[in-house]
Amino acid sequence: MSTADESRPVREEDAVDVGAVLRWLRTHTEADVPDGVPEVRQFPGGASNLTYLLRWSRPGSTYDAHELILRRPPVGAKARGAHDMGREYLIQHALGPVYPYVAGMVGLCTDESVLGSDFYVMERLDGVILRKDPTFELSPSGASTLCEHAWRALVRLHEVHVGQVPALASLGRGEGYVARQVSGWTDRLRRAATDDLGDWGELTAWLDRHQPADSGQCLIHNDWRFDNLVLDPDDDLRVTGVLDWEMATVGDPLMDLGGALAYWIQEDDDPFYREFRRQPTTVPGMWTRQQVIDWYCARRGIEMTRERWRFYEAFGLFRLAVIIQQIWYRFVQGQTHNPAFAGFGEAVGYLEQRTRRVVSA
C-alpha cells in the first residue's frame, strides 16, 4: 500500500504549470529528474497548503516509477504568514539528521515567477496515510498499538535537543509562548471574521485570563494527526514519516498536545463531532483523549490534573475553530470554490459551543 494510491486528479483551481516546475528542477536542484513530463496528481485535503505528486512511470511498468512531492500555498491564502514555504522547508532540512521521520528535501523555490508563489519539492515517503475511514480492517488491538506508535513519535519530537541544531533553535522566541498564541489566534479570528461568526469575546477573554505560564520549550509540530503520519502497513503500522511541518516551531509541548487532541474525536462524542472527524479515532480500540493525556504525561514526567488541562483543551478547540474560520473566510470571499469547505461555517459555530462547555464545566 502506498501514499500514491490515494492521489487524485488536480482540482482545476489548484492546477500547476508542470513545465515551469520541470525547468526549475533541472536548473536549480541536483534532483534525479527523468526525461519526459510527469503525471501530476493531488493529495486529498488541501485545506491549508496543497500537496502534489509528480510521477514519472518507468517504460513498460505500471508500478516502477520515480516520484517527487511538491508543496505550495493555496490560491488566495489570507494568512500569508501561515503559508511560509521557506520556513517549512528549512525546518525539515534541519530536522532530518536528528529526527528519523522527515522526508529528504530536494529544493526550495522562492522565485514567484515560476508558480506564482514559493514552493518546495521533497522525496516521497512510501507508506499508508489514515484518513477518516480506513480502507482496511483495523482490529481493536491493532488500533491501540497504532495509538502508541503515533504518540511515541510525538514524544520523540518533543525530546529533540533543539539547542544543538542552530536552525531549529532560532525558531524560539523565548518565554511567553502561551501568551503569544492566545493573542495571535485571537487576532487571526478578528481578521477572518464573516457575518455569521458570532461573538467570541467572552471566550477569548477567558483564555486571556486563564493562560498558564509556559510548561516548557521544545520543538512542536502544531498539527499532529494521523493524516500527517506515514505508516508502514507491513510493520505493524509503525510511523515511518511525519508530514506538514507548516506550523512547527519551538514552543510549549502541552499546547501541541492540546491542539492535537482537538482533532481526536472519540467513539462516545456526539454525532456532529463524529461526522466532523478527519481520522479514524472512533474505531474500537482507539484510545480516548484522557488515555492519550495520561500516557503522554506519564512518559514525560508531567503532573496533570483535570483543572490544569482545562486551558489546553479549551485553547485547542479555539485554535481549531480559528483555522476553520480562516478557510471559511476564503470560501465566503470566493477565493476558493472547494465544495468540501461549504459546511465550515457550521463547524465553527459548533466548536464555539463546545469550547463554551469546556470553560464552564
Image: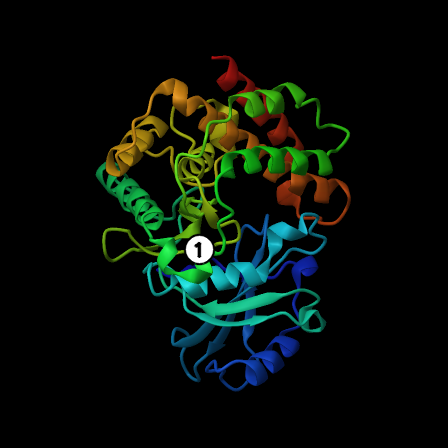
Viewer can see residue 110: yes
Q: Is residue 129 above or below residue 210?
A: below
Q: Quadrant of residue 280?
A: top left
Viewer can see residue 4: no
- The amino acid sitting under disc 1 is Ala
Residue occupying the far front of the picture: 174
Please name whichever residue, 162 or 130, is drawn nearer the observer in this view of the structure. Answer: 162
Find numbered disc 1 in the image and state the secondary structure of the residue it sits on. helix
Q: Estimate the x, y position of residue 63 in percent, counting from the top left.
A: 39, 73
Colour option used: rainbow
Q: Is residue 187 above or below residue 64?
A: above
305 left or right, relative to 342: left
Q: Residue at x 57, y 63 (%)?
A: 86
- Residue tagged 1: 169
Q: Residue at x 71, y 23 (%)?
A: 198
283 left or right, relative to 358: left
Please name whichever residue, 28 or 168, is drawn nearer the observer in this view of the structure. Answer: 168
